[in-house]
Image (spheres, helix red, strand yellow):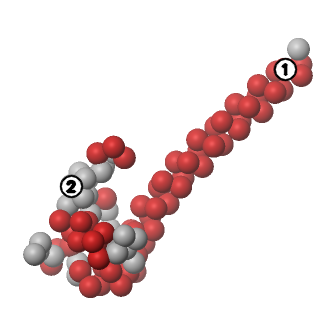
Amino acid sequence: MKKNCCRSEVFAGLVFSLFFLSCAVQAQANLKEMKAYKEAFPDAKAKCATCHIQAMPKKENAELNDYGKAAIAANPSPTAETFKQLGKIEDFSSK
């Protein structure tokens, strides 16, 4: 009985760890773009609404605004150089 109990605890811990890591990887991709935007414009405050229509988008509803679409069109994985070419969100007008 004790052996089965330990296996279930290990299994539960493994499932939790995998779930946690998958969430962390998704968040890291978003942070990467935010860091690139802040690198391009140190005085700006990057937030989800910089590139997305919703302020707090869900994964299944993460529609991009015109600025976000332009960033992805310029580079599928936007860097600081990409954002410098586009300019700040406040100065951006869709073309």
| Residue 94 visible | yes
Secondary element at tag 2? loop
Residue depicted at x 89% and y 22%: 3
Q: Residue at x 77, y 33 (%)?
A: 10
| Location of residue 31 in the rendering, given as x and y in whole percent from the top left corner | 44, 64
**Tag 2: Cα neighbours inside 10 Å, few (<14), some, or many (≥20)?**
some
The residues bearing labels 2 and 1 have C-alpha atoms spaced at a distance of: 49 Å
Q: Residues within 10 Å of mark 1 (few under 14, many from 20)?
A: few
Quadrant housing residue 90: bottom left
> In this figure, which residue is indicated by the disc labeled 1?
4
In the image, 2: left or right of 46? right
- Which residue lies under the disc numbered 2? 53
Amino acid bearing label 2: Ile
- 95 above or below 58? below
Return the residue found at the far top.
1
Q: In which quadrant will I find the C terminus?
A: bottom left
| Quadrant occupied by the N terminus | top right
